[in-house]
Amino acid sequence: MKIKNKFYIETMGCQMNKLDSDLVIAQLSDDGFDRIENPDDAGVIIFNTCSVRQHAEDKVLTKVNQFKKRYQQHRDVIIAIIGCMAQRMGQQLLDENPQVAVVCGPGQLHELSDLIQNAVASLEDEHQKLAPQSEGRRKKKANPQRIVSLNNPEQQELMEQLDSTRTHRDFDHPFMAYVRVMKGCNNFCHYCIVPYVRGREYYRPIENIVDECKRLADDGIKEIILLGQAVNSYKYIEKGKTLNLADVIERVNEIDSVQRIRFVTSYPRDFDYRIFEMMAAMPKVCSYLHMPAQTGSGKMLKAMNRHYTIGRYDEIIEKAREIVPDIAIAGDFIAGYCGETEQDQQQTLDLIKRVRYKNIFAFFYSPRPGTKAYDKFEDNVPMEIKKRRLKEILDLQNEIAAEYNQNFIGKTVEVLVEGPSKKTKQNETADSNHIQLTGRTQGDHIVVFDGTKEMIGTLKNIKIEKTTSLTLFG
Ligand code: SF4
């Protein structure tokens, strides 16, 4: 029996995972696999996973379980788990889920295609009742012991090759591409699993980043999103001079066909204010800052091992608004971290009111095995209180966002047109040219408007007529 060379990939979690999925899609497509949207027709099913919350991991296991019967009855599918959960759980995933054939962490991604092809060959051998796989093949099997070695230079070199040589194949965002400037994180916030599953900070050579952006731009990419867990920590020594994120932005800005540059996620420390000056002076640099606060309480910041104060956070926001008055600011918050009191919660609400975020990403605290908070602190805020505090945070932000968005009514905004809106995708007839489209502003606002297919992939000025807390309509 031949295993179908069609793969389905599902991506959970942060932009780093989305970028990894882009690299996997490119790698597998180069090796003769076709990406499809229906897992039931795929011979290879890949879950790119997130370990930041227990709920995210549980969801993956439920999905993996849905294919158990198919695997047991037909043996016609290779299931691969990649990403942070693969890194965190390794062998345990293979032991507890017989339908899973490949477990591959972020540091081993360059080997994924080989691992999958090996698993396919092995399953096909099994169908033909051939002898067990040859020694050569067995050696290439996913080996969780190798999963942990994220920090050695050899591994980084291989990963660098994967990033540097990719071809652009993101069907979901044909005009936008994530480009990694660094990997890993050195901050070790007590609640966070990332430094353990993604390793310590490694900064890519600036010339590789710029070359990658050039190639993507030649391939039709209009917007580059520079990516790092703490992207403003980037540093790279070139000819004896230490370069930082501002230097990367400056060089990418020189690429003619790049029309927009964005960067995420910023850590509220060591912020080079040159970046805000660039936003103000360089039209391609988006007036957008995603800078997680996590809490508005100084006491909680210390308990989380965040290496800054609320005063410092406020100072960066103030500076940003002074230099770039229309900057859109996004933030992240955790509700109900260990030891959080009602007073701490009030300070968080106060911060949200002060900053007036464009949007936030907020979740209740979920203890993660392997982190300091899990080992040392009691998860002592009851679930109903965590949920209530999260709701307070989200309700407040919704109100702010609705008011904030109303300010756009009557204004004209520049939109990068991404494609048909959800409504058009559901109703589209093959020959319709006048359709509802969707795109994004520099400040990452989603804009829905009527237009024609020719507008897709271009920058257009759209006049806003009405708004909700999530969307602008023009
Ligand atoms: S800065 Fe903190 S929260 Fe962000 S990835 Fe690093 S350790 Fe995790």
Image (spheres, rainbow, N blue to C red):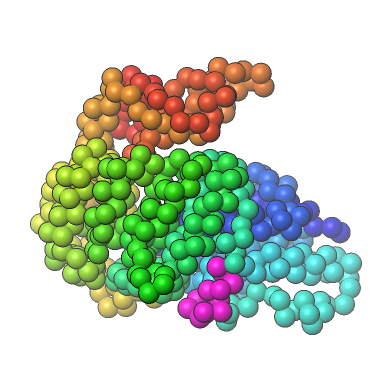
Residue at horizontal 25 percent and vertical 74 percent from the top: 377
Look at the picture and state if 177 lies above or below 84. Answer: above
Residue found 60% across the figure and 45% down from its top: 219
Quadrant, the N terminus: bottom right
Query: What stretch of residues is rendered in magenta?
Result: 148-160
Where is residue 376 drawn, in percent x and y? Answer: 27, 78
- Taking the spot 57% from the left edge, 24% from the top edge, the residue there is 453
Camera-side residue of 366 and 268: 268
Main SS class of the magenta portion in the image? helix
Q: Nearer the viewer, residue 29 or 197?
A: 29
Percent position of residue 435, x then y: 54, 20
Side (left or right) of 341 relative to 294:
left
Toward the viewer: 284 or 173?
A: 284
The stretch drawn in magenta includes residue 211: no
Seen in the picture, residue 255 relative to 160 is either above or below; the reply is above
Name the spot of residue 4 as percent of width and height, x first: 78, 53
